[in-house]
Image (spheres, rainbow, N blue to C red):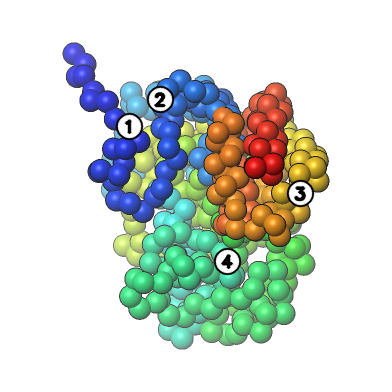
Amino acid sequence: MSVEQAPVQRADFDQVMVPNYAPAAFIPVRGAGSRVWDQSGRELIDFAGGIAVNVLGHAHPALVGALTEQANKLWHVSNVFTNEPALRLAHKLVDATFAERAFFCNSGAEANEAAFKLARRVAHDRFGAEKYEIIAALNSFHGRTLFTVNVGGQSKYSDGFGPKITGITHVPYNDLAALKAAVSDKTCAVVLEPVQGEGGVLPAELAYLQGARELCDQHNALLVFDEVQTGMGRSGELFAYQYYGVTPDILTSAKSLGGGFPIAAMLTTEALAKHLVVGTHGTTYGGNPLACAVAEAVVDVINTPQVLNGVKAKHDRFKTRLLQIGEKYGLFSEVRGLGLLLGCVLSEAWKGKAKDVFNAAEKEGLMILQAGPDVVRFAPSLVIEDADIDEGLDRFERAVAKLTQA
């Protein structure tokens, strides 16, 4: 017997939800591939991907199948026991990366929290209590917990929550001299995004990451790559560190790892992992069978030459057209990013107006993203059809045309 559900609408958000979000005026209710339908039946093309999460689009049969099969077997047992999907997923991630050990949790912030705690614990055990300083980049983003938001280099997110966590220094991104000046024997970790996501879709320069690796080696510090947004095929490689050829000591993954189901991972070496002995860290839901079964299916689909090479081809398709639109309408001055994480940097005349572009795109039936007020961001499905790319960019051009002619 089904219970009649009371109808809800966008106005309900303002009545029952904490007002820390300002969601769009429509409510998506169904998705298939790279198309989404709202309550009124209007169809939109999805270039947002749930903020780089829906890596295989909506309702991908491999993910629906994995979730449905696991849902009929086992949902949760806690980490008092292990489970088969978690072990299979860990094997696949270890086999595909530098890592030898995996820790599963539920979000990028939790993965980063685990990474930062591990870095401090390793330094504490090996070198003593004074080696705890973490160096991160200005305009970085590493999560919303108190620890991760303080490591993130954006004070607008960390101010107003009481005393800051100490021992964290921020330096300009892509500035090797500044990093070199900041690193010392008290540094336990250097934390970097290979592409700054929330900070404006800004890729690292190869020499910067290579220099960071050398500085960490010189000072017995760990190099942590936050690949929450860049990981799982987004760059055209399974992880962006593989694109650059610079190997971290600890890597964090979330967002795309579950294709829309909440899961995250911290990956590291056996030698470092052994510092998190029984009882030093934990999570109730981390590694639960539902999440791991879905993530395993995600890895199986993405970690293939066909999909990864497709990302590179789709990058070129996006970039060529976006550059044409930028030149024609003068809206943005640069298109940057890796793979299917792209950012259009707004020109001087349009600085601060990324939200206006978002709103104009929505009116044309297109879901896009911002990366701060000055960058329009695209993070679509990695298997988005070329026809959807072309149609979505047609809609984007119509939105831009109306915006610039208004």
Under mark 1, the amino acid is Gln
How much space separates mark 1 and mark 2, taking CA atoms? Answer: 8 Å
Kind of residue at badge 2: Gln
In the rendered structure, are the residues bearing label 1 and label 3 in contact, judged by CB atoms less than 8 Å apart? no
Mark 2 touching mark 4, by CB under 8 A?
Answer: no
**Secondary structure of the residue carrying numbered label 4:** loop
Q: Quick check: marks 1 and 2 in contact, CB under 8 Å?
A: yes
For the point 70% across and 57% down, which residue is it? 349
Tell me which numbered mark, 2 or 4, is placed earlier along the sequence.
2
In the image, residue 343 above or below residue 33: below
Q: Quadrant of the N terminus?
A: top left
- Say whether residue 52 is visible: no
Give amino acid for label 3: Gly
Q: Position of residue 197 (x, y in %)?
A: 59, 55
Q: What is the crowding at mark 3: few (fewer than 14 residues within 10 Å), some, or many (at least 20)?
A: some
In this rendering, position of residue 20 left or right of residue 215: left
Secondary structure, mark 1, is: loop
Bin the neighbour count of mark 4 within 10 Å (Cα to Cα): few under 14, some 14-19, many 20 and up.
some
Secondary structure at badge 2 equals: loop
Check disc 1 and report the residue beneath it: 9
Instruction: Identify residue for label 3.
Output: 330
* Mark pair 2, 3: CA separation: 35 Å
Identify the residue position indicated by label 2 in the image: 39
